[in-house]
Amino acid sequence: MEISHKKSLALLTVASVVVFFLAYLIGYTIFQYKSYNLMMKQTSVNKTASDDIILVVIDNKSLANLGRWPWKRTRFLEIFDYLEYHTEAKVYGFDAIIIAPDTDYPQYDKEFSNKIGSYKKLVAGVGFMYDDFKDDSNKDFYNEILPYKHNIKFIDKRSAKYKGESPYQSFTPFLKEYFYNIRNLGSVNTRQDNDGYIRKVDQVIKYNDELYPSLGLFMYSKASGVEEFTIDDKYITGKNDKFTLKIPVTNSKGAAYSNIAYYKTQDGTYSHRKISASDIIESLNNIKEGKEPVINPEIFKDKIVFVGSNANSQALADVKRTPVSDTFAGLDIQATNFNNLYKNEFFTEVSPLYDFVMILTVFIFVLLLICTLPIPVALMCTSLTMFLYFIFTFIMYDHRIAVGLILPEVFMLIAIGFGYSYRYLVEGRKKEKIQSAMGKYISKDVMRNVVSNIDSVKLGGKRACVTVLFADIRGFTSISEQLSAEEVTNILNEYFSAIAPIIENYNGILNKFMGDAVLAVFGEPIKNENHAIDAVRCADAMLKKVKQLQVKWLDEGKPKIEIGIGISTGEAFVGNIGSEERLEYTVIGDTVNTASRIENYNKVYKTKFLISEETFLRVQKYVDVIKIREVTIRGKSKKINIYEVLRILP
């Protein structure tokens, strides 16, 4: 079933819309995170972490120097003592949660828990959870004390939809004595996306109708002196005389979180300066003994320190998957969050709506390019657009703004496909119109032959055996004198319109109109061994059609028109003649002249349908004829027999 042009365009439009949305939904899931990771990694190498932040890590060197894990917990006190009493660090964070008691050395647990409250610059980590406490016996104790573990004031100006009930039902169950004595706790909650990568951190968490700061935000408060923060639907802000903070956040009922802006890593694990915990402990011991410390306390002056673990031990390994590395230290994630706050270097991710609009825009833009411009120009402009969009994306990421990269590029390629599909339909329709229009000037079969051999159209042709039909209107000159030019034209048009389809139906080529005469060719370019009988049957049908027209014209008061037909079979030249600029497909030769001369004998013998002897020999089984006589054909030395066709046999 042939589909109309309008239906084809409608189907293409529907297919474009369906494919666009399917590709968007699937592509967004597959490519959005990959695009984020790729561009974050490429642009983070240009961003160096602050020298004001130092990591103290229980690493492989620490285990080698001080013994394998687990250590007695008083080892932590040695690190804290060094930082609290022997350095001028502004604040230090402890990215560890003390949960299980040390059954081998309970006395050290007690010493650790009792002394932990003496460190004023220490902020420890707490993790909030969606499940309820496993042991309800201490639930009230934990919930009653937790609000006193930070001194930050939050002014919540968020919309009502973000102030609903929080999904967080509990937090990490610390050792009871440790939890009671620790002065400061900050959330270490990060957000792991569906692909397992950490790109966001909770800056504020709502728990039991109270708001709690992240470890980084709490440490920022201590380092800057900003103790009051305002939360609205888009930002967390805080300031004093020296510091101003404005964090772009995404809100939910349970938290306000921000994207992490990562920095260059030297080894794929750390982006900040790292010192082994064993060097800190050894430095403390040296100071106590009056020796030169391994690590000069001066390097910590006005610095922010993060203490944690990351070693080749099941209990200490702490690496996370991040956009910049699959082996990024968890401790460094907390340090990176603080770095973002301290330097106001935030990463902003555009909304899904922005991404959708951008994708739709480039899709339509490229589609218009492909549909309107010449193909080479369209491809060049599209390639330039894709390149410029990549540069735009790189610049945006370099300015810490995440926009989609892969999906818009993919949709530009999809637009190319749909654009060329559209052009194919439109140009195909134009070709159909051209062929239809040209078919009014030349035979459709000739035109099809030209189109199918478009690259080999040239002057020249071949000799072939064909049958030529020549039809002429009787007494046309006198008829023309009786009628106006418009009336003559109308009669001719009606006559030609009636016989042209007949010629085509019998595999003939209507070669040309010559005034009131018609020249048709059978056997070329449509290959047909029965071209002679086809020509004869065509002539019979033409005569019958003229009889029908005569009745109609008589009713309309128009003159009676008779036609005469002459048919000749023989060899002729068939092909293109003219010049390189203007060609005409025609048939030339004695056979054509013979058909014309035979038709003229209709006037002499008062007949309507005469054929040559060569034609008669090919069709004698299919027709009843009367042999007229031998006649002289001008240009021929020998006379030929001509025959009148009376009827076509069944």
Image (cartoon, rainbow, N blue to C red):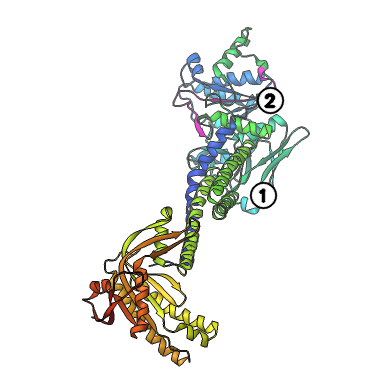
Q: Residues within 10 Å of mark 1 (few under 14, many from 20)?
A: some
Q: Which residue is mark 2?
A: 90
Q: How many marks?
A: 2
Q: Which residue is mark 1?
A: 158
Residue positioned 47% across, 62% down in the render = 431
Residue positioned 41% across, 78% down in the render = 472
Range drawn in magenta: 299-322
Return the x and y of residue 532 as percentages of the image width and height. 28, 71
Residue 404 visible somewhere in the drawing: no
Magenta stretch containing residue 307, yes or no? Answer: yes
**In the depicted structure, whether residue 307 falls above or below residue 159:** above
Real-space Cα separation, disc 1 to disc 2, in angstroms = 32 Å
**In the depicted structure, whether residue 276 falls above or below residue 1:** above
Residue 177 lies left or right of residue 421; in this view the side is right
Residue 265 visible somewhere in the drawing: yes
Q: Quadrant of residue 461?
A: bottom left
Magenta stretch containing residue 465, yes or no? Answer: no
**In the depicted structure, whether residue 59 falls above or below residue 170:** above
193 or 89: nearer the viewer: 193
